[in-house]
């Protein structure tokens, strides 16, 4: 399986990799939304872990763009921001999960639950 890690902080991408290393064969990384869209279109990863707050496009905008090009894209929003409106917007945009960065281990649970989907 393949995954695209989208976060403007390399340290967070490294931590995400550590948590889900055993679940994926290939990791793609992006530090911006614009770059993430390009990488997604070329590699079509099985999963995307998407930060919300980045320079340029925010994560919700990127999710919408990816879902426009591939409605079956599997995306989890991973962010330090956790308010009800953001959560609603993320799910409306098409994410399958929403994880606060303080609870990164929850990403693995969402991936396991959605493994067959």
Image: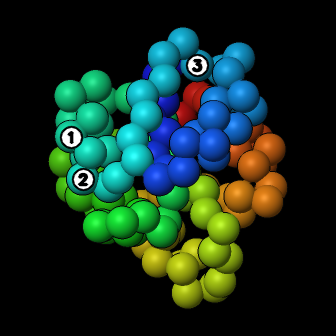
In percent of width and height, residue 102 lies at: 79, 60
Q: Left or right of 53: which side holds 71? A: left
* Residue farthest toward the bottom in the current orientation of the protein: 85
Label 2 crowd (10 A; few <14 / some 14-19 / many >=20)? some
Callouts 2 and 1 close, C-beta under 8 Å? yes
First in residue order: circle 3 vs circle 2: 3
Q: Which residue is mark 2?
A: 34
Label 1 crowd (10 A; few <14 / some 14-19 / many >=20)? few
Q: Which mark is residue 38?
A: 1
Mark pair 3, 1: CA separation: 20 Å
Front position among marks 3 and 2: 2
Q: Which residue is mark 3?
A: 24
Residue 89 visible from this viewpoint:
yes
At x 65%, y 83%, the residue is 83
In percent of width and height, residue 112 lies at: 71, 33
At x 26%, y 45%, the residue is 35
Q: Mark 2: which secondary structure? A: helix
């Amino acid at each position: 399986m393949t995954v695209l890690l989208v976060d403007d902080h390399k340290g967070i991408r490294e931590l995400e990799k550590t948590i889900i290393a055993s679940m994926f064969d290939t990791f793609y990384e992006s530090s911006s939304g614009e770059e993430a869209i390009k990488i997604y279109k070329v590699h079509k990863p099985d999963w995307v872990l998407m930060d919300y707050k980045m320079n340029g496009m925010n994560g919700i905008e990127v999710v919408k763009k990816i879902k426009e090009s591939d409605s079956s894209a599997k995306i989890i929003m991973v962010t330090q921001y956790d308010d009800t409106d953001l959560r609603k917007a993320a799910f409306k945009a098409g994410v399958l999960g929403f994880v606060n960065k303080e609870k990164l281990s929850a990403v693995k649970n969402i991936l396991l639950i959605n493994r067959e989907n």
